[in-house]
Image: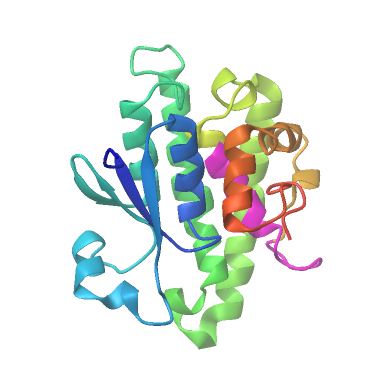
Amino acid sequence: MSQPMYTLYFSPDSASFIVRLALRLTGASFAERQIDRPAGELDSPGYRAMHPLGKIPAMETPDGPMFETAAMLLYLAERHTGLAPSPASPERAAFLKWFFYTVTNLHAPLMQVFYPDRVAGPECSAAVVAHQSAKLKEHFAILDHMVARDAPDWLSAKPSIFSFYVGVLVRWLSSFPTGHPARITTADLPGLGPILAKLETCPAALAVAQAEGCAPTIFTAPY
């Protein structure tokens, strides 16, 4: 049996969810190993050698270990066709600017809403959540307006690392209860909502939903 091209170190419904989706799109051979978080594996020397911050995910590749979700996604897109516009494509510039917009303006503040103590300590958690929730609403509205206006092919027509990335962020935000300032669902996104509803029916999404043991409606009704 041939060796897998990649090995993904994952934990259910973490940022590894996004990379699992992308790996399914590549069609390449890959292995997955769940991290034993309760046993402290994130702090083990072996895992820290792959990810110096002891976070998830990490991925072994033919070119060495990788960490940072966005870096893994772009790496996979460069090695496998169909995950993003090619460097020679006229759509590449728009793809890159919105991809990094998502990394900086959506993913980063989302993590601060989930883990406000990490930002400013327990005494400032409520202020962090309120401030970053407002920013998330603002920045998602900007992205949604772009999608409704431009309907870029790399987001609206077929699965891509970008569409899966945004879909998982919406998935997490929909986990907040009604009334939470950061709650966003596909129903709140007239441009993105229909795209994500279609995206969750693709084979890669259904396969990862089954592997994660979650509902197949991973973006529209995930919890």
The answer to whether residue 139 is visible is no
Give the image location of residue 36, x and y in percent: 40, 74
Q: Which residue reaches farthest front?
A: 1
Q: Identify the residue shown where x is 49% and y is 37%.
A: 24
Give the image location of residue 79, x and y in percent: 31, 28
Range of the magenta residues? 164-182
The magenta stretch spans residue 137: no
Q: Identify the residue shown where x is 44% and y is 73%.
A: 119
Q: Is residue 78 above or below residue 172?
A: above
The answer to whether residue 188 is visible is yes
Name the one closer to the observer, 119 or 160.
160
Q: Identify the residue shown where x is 59% and y is 43%.
A: 207
Q: Is residue 28 above or below residue 126?
A: above
Name the one closer to the observer, 126 or 65.
65
Task: Tally the numbered discs.
Answer: 0
Name the one closer to the observer, 158 or 128.
158
Q: Which residue reaches farthest bottom?
A: 123
